[in-house]
């Protein structure tokens, strides 16, 4: 039994007192007695009883039916009607107020007890159901997709705010209308009642104002306790933002690919500019010398011829560099032939003459005689040695008694070329990054030279390493596999020597040593 707080509404006071005694005997509490509907509403608003026992015939303008309807709608308080009348019209009118019970006078304590107990339990169940429906409705109203529910005849019974926005229909206007009248899909089949959950895919929804919206449609049946279909749920997911996001992603991807192509093109252009700078400098120097010798008239013809030959040689070398770099960019196999290492080093030293004099660097060349040939691309290999030598010269700018050592010798499994300087050197942190793309220790450097050098040497199945020199400076060592295995007798080793043309020039005290310009 559930004890309850009960309001009695009865215009006959004797009956009301007798009813109060009956309720007290079965452990209920009477919170008040009323003789009119208006008074009953006022007491209910103040006391909020658990249940009201209401006579159908009351004094005043409001009878029991009207009062019961008001109590249910305003306060959700259940009502049990008490009456001596059971004619069809009275019962019909009383049922409109949706009472929780109907007692005919006179009644026994057991009848009263049973009716009140059932009414309280029924009201509690209805309240839980209403709370569940409110939670369900709140959940469906808060999700981001449009949700529409229909009954067994495909008439709309629910729409959440998103569905209202998509279709252009307010639920209060769409309730009870056929689904096809509210949800109009272009180029889609009839909206049939689904027998199982299904994904209809992307469709175009035409809203009430005529706006076309791309949506993704899903349908699921509503089943009763016996598995019978009693309706359906339609879910409409707005694909507009997703399509916009996909379009933006495709555009961003295209822009990234374009940027990557531009970056690759920029790297290629930068590498070409870096590699071709040396022969262009040599051409410029020889052209200047050519002009000076031409001013000497016939006596300078031999020098003019030599300078013009050097210009032709360096211009051809620049063209070879461009061809080789473009070949690497296209991943084409470079031309390969037997290469005399000492010969390409000697040619490189002639190119360096002007730069050595300009920076006051003493050259020490020690090239082992009789070295076997190596298989490779002479232009690329010479460019590697030249880049290493130029880097060393520029690194020693401002150092006292700068000296460059270039040596070659035979190793067990190939040939080794070493380029040494007595500059400031690099610390361990720099040494780890020195071969990385775009990493440079020079203010005007591009950070591509050493990367290109290592790439070329690796393409020749060799290695390029960096080690510290003592007491200062760097040692770059190139190891290349030779074509012919063999040993060179000790007498074939050329001794270390100073070439007269590479000796550091004597400087006047008032002439400061000039630093290399960024373009050199």
Image (cartoon, helix red, strand yellow):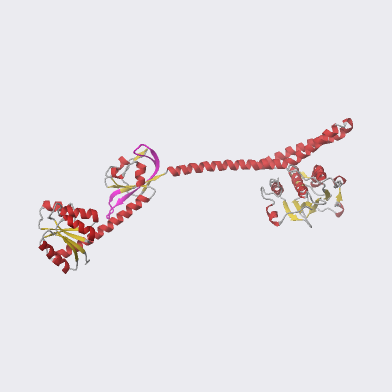
Report whether residue 138 is seen: yes
Q: Above or below — where is 516 with respect to 297?
A: below
Indicate left or right for 490 with 376 as reference. right
Q: Start and end of the magenta stretch?
A: 203-231
- Residue 212 locus on image (x, y percent): 39, 38
Report the side of 327 relative to 14 (left or right).
Answer: right
Would residue 332 be visible to someone looking at this image?
no
What residue sits 83% from the left and 36% below the top?
A: 289
Q: Position of residue 344 (x, y in %)?
A: 79, 44
Q: Quadrant of residue 321?
A: top right
Q: Residue at horizontal 50%, vertical 44%? A: 249
**Residue 213 on the magenta span:** yes
Q: Nearer the viewer, residue 104 or 199?
A: 104
Predominant SS of the magenta segment: strand
- Viewed as shown, does residue 286 lie left or right of 172? right
Establish if 261 lies above or below 364.
above
**Split into 4 quadrants, where in the image is the C terminus?**
top right
């Amino acid at each position: 039994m559930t004890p309850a707080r009960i309001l009695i509404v009865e215009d006959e006071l004797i009956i009301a007192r007798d009813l109060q005694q009956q309720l007290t005997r079965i452990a209920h509490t009477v919170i008040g007695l009323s003789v009119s509907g208006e008074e009953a509403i006022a007491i209910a608003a103040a006391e909020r009883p658990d249940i009201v026992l209401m006579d159908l015939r009351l004094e005043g303008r409001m009878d029991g039916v009207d009062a019961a309807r008001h109590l249910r709608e305003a306060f959700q308080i259940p009502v049990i009607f008490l009456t001596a009348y059971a004619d069809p019209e009275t019962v019909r009118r009383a049922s409109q107020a949706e009472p929780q019970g109907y007692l005919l006078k006179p009644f026994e304590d057991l009848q009263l007890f049973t009716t009140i107990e059932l009414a309280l339990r029924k009201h509690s169940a209805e309240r839980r159901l209403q709370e569940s429906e409110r939670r369900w409705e709140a959940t469906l109203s808060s999700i981001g997709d449009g949700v529409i529910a229909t009954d067994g005849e495909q008439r709309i019974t629910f729409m959440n705010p998103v569905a209202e926005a998509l279709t252009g229909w307010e639920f209060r206007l769409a309730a009870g209308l056929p689904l096809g009248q509210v949800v109009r899909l272009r180029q889609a089949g009839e909206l049939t009642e689904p027998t199982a959950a299904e994904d209809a895919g992307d469709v175009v929804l035409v809203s009430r104002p005529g706006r076309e919206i791309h949506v993704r449609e899903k349908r699921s049946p509503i089943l009763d306790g016996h598995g019978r279909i009693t309706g359906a749920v339609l879910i409409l997911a707005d694909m507009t933002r997703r399509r916009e996001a996909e379009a933006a992603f495709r555009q961003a991807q295209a822009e990234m690919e374009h940027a990557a192509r531009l970056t690759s093109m920029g790297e290629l252009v930068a590498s070409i500019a870096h590699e071709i700078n040396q022969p262009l400098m040599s051409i410029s120097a020889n052209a200047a010398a050519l002009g000076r010798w031409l001013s000497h008239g016939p006596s300078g013809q031999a020098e003019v011829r030599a300078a013009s030959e050097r210009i032709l040689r360096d211009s051809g070398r620049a063209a070879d560099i461009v061809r080789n770099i473009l070949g690497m960019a296209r991943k084409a196999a470079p031309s390969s032939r037997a290469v005399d290492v000492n010969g390409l080093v000697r040619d490189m030293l002639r190119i360096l003459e002007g730069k050595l004099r300009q920076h006051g660097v003493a050259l020490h060349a020690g090239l082992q005689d009789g070295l076997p040939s190596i298989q490779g691309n002479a232009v690329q290999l010479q460019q590697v040695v030249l880049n290493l030598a130029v880097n060393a010269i520029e690194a020693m700018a401002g150092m006292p008694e700068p000296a460059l050592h270039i040596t070659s010798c035979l190793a067990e499994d190939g040939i080794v070329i070493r380029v040494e300087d007595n500059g400031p050197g690099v610390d361990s942190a720099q040494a780890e990054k020195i071969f990385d793309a775009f990493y440079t220790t020079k203010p005007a450097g591009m950070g591509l030279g050493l990367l290109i050098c290592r790439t070329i040497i690796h393409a020749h199945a060799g290695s390029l390493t960096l080690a510290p020199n003592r007491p200062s400076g760097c040692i770059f060592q190139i190891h290349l596999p030779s074509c012919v295995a063999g040993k060179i007798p000790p007498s074939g080793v050329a001794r270390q020597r100073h070439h007269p043309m590479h000796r550091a020039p004597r400087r006047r005290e008032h002439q400061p040593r000039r630093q290399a310009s960024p373009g050199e």
